[in-house]
Amino acid sequence: MDEFDEDAFNKFFPSSFGKQSKSVDVDSQIDRSKRVDISVAKLESNKPTTATEPTGSGDEKKDSNDDSDNDSSDDSDDDDDEFPVSHELVLKSHERAVTSMTVDPSGARLITGSTDCTLKLHDFASMTPSTLRAFKSVDPSAQKSSAAQDTHPVNFVAFNALSPSHVLAIPATSKPRILSRDGEVLTEFVKGDPYLRDLHLTKGHVSEVTCGAWSPSNLNLCATAGTDSTIRIWDANSGRSQKEVIVHKSRAAGSAGRTKITAIAWGSPKQGGADILVGAALDGSLAMWGGNGPYTRPSGEIKDAHARDTWTSGLDISSDGRLVITRGGDDTIKLWDTRKFKTPVTTVTHASTSSRYPTSNIQFSPSSANVITGSETGHLHILNPATLRPELVTPVTPGSPLITVLWHEKLNQILTGSANAETHVLYNPTMSTKGAATVMSKAPKLRHVDDVIMTTDLSQGLSGDSVVVGSNGVPHYSSSTWSSRHPEVGLTASGRSRDPRRPYQPAQTPFSKTNPDDKHIRDNIPLSSRLDEDPREALLKYAEKAEKDPIYTRAYKETQPTAIFAELSDEEEKGPEKKKPRR
């Protein structure tokens, strides 16, 4: 007789009956998000060429390059532990290129802006591996008083580090806005008078605003810069007029003293010290002011920081306030020292994407130990700030330009936005906390049987029109293509909300619970006996009573004359009067 296999028997017959809870293998779920191609060979990648080389002989440089050739494969294995890029989470919330993004200081909420003219709000706490989507879509350029919605691409969006409930949103208009963390408009900055030549006298920007920044030391102040050659400092609680106006006077020939401000950065040393406000312009200049004023003239200015008429899209200040990094449209990245603000410390060659995507940025890591930026080929470049040579080049969206990057300090995760409308969250399960690591450690959300039509393929969704709620709370409709790519808006076929945070509330009607008979309807539903009554007959039966005893016209009964009508027989019919012939 065969031996009794107790393990197989216990596996076949459950130990209990009823609804069984399925355990989730978190490790295998995280392993599925592991990236295959972490790094590429540094010499084969889009490697910058140093313009200002460090001191040393040519033989030493050659030897160092040879060493990098031999050790490139060994370094790529160590990069997984050094940088949080081993795993990734992909969000497909937008239709077009992702141009800007921001995460609140706690790392709980992510807001992304795009050229599809919308802001997408994501909560890491409400997302699961099967529900990677935004819970709200906001149009930051929607007008409160206008019924026609004019939409504009999003140039900049940023949480206030000192007050996470405020978000600075800059669409491609002359009126930036302060939004709440839920996308509601708190303050709208006014547009200035375009007919005033002196820009000091206008109450706001007179043309498109390109970039902005929050004050690192005052939670109520923010700065915006635009194509009107001004940087304006605002009080976030009042949008009727700015507090300070910095008019940048261009020295380039033929510019008439005006140029476009392409990027600004407002930084403060973590160990304490004076704030620094830096701005880059289209004429190639780079200017620096004291963050607390006065703003009458810059404390340092470089006339030819980058090539003239090239868009310097990337600008950032290190955490100690001593270094400034710029990424110009002349295919260069330059490092500047604020204490010797005349010539760059280091210059390297790096292909620019600002001609197609003016919001391409560059950023220091939270500790300023590295510099991150994207490339035209869709690779993420992690650079050494001393030499600006790549320490890691990893493909994120190969073939699609990488536009915006963000390294969050608390999460220790790198977020990227690409031209193919994808947002990638790079993380490491051992180094990163919360954010994408929390999402991938959750069990996939169980879906209702009626949601199969929508959830079979999340990229297709349901056809038909959907509703987008503007920042002013006014919904407006869009095409079915938008609806198919935004499954978080509207209802499913069964009437359930697509918002993962909103519970299902069925519509309650008198006939929803039972099918009552006629007696129950007559006894419990008022005026149910008049359902089959003709309303004309119901009114005419009171005609005689109204004529004998008028309630509302009784005061005029004695004063109104009696109407006299001509009496006509049934055979006579009064025809139209004939016109007299003209003599």
Image (spheres, rainbow, N blue to C red):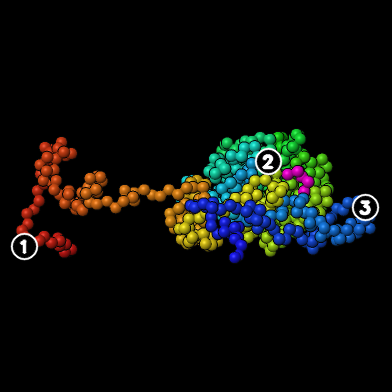
Q: What is the CA distance from the residue labelled 2 to the residue labelled 3? A: 43 Å
Residue denoted by label 2: 246
Question: Badge 1 local density, few (<14 within 10 Å), some, or many (20+)?
Answer: few
Occupied quadrant, residue 290: top right
Q: Is residue 14 in the magenta section?
A: no
**Residue numbers of the magenta segment:** 366-370
- Depth check, mark 1 against mark 3: the one in front is 3
Residue denoted by label 1: 571
Q: In this view, does 436 lie to the left or right of 563?
A: right
Answer whether residue 143 is visible to the viewer in this image. Answer: no
The residue under label 3 is which amino acid type? Answer: Gly
Q: Is residue 367 in the magenta section?
A: yes
Looking at the rendered structure, the secondary structure element under dot 1 is: loop
In the rendered structure, which disc, 2 or 1, sits on the residue that comes first in sequence?
A: 2
Q: Where is residue 580 in the image (x, y as percent from the top left)?
A: 15, 62
Q: Position of residue 170 (x, y in %)?
A: 60, 47
Occupied quadrant, residue 552: top left
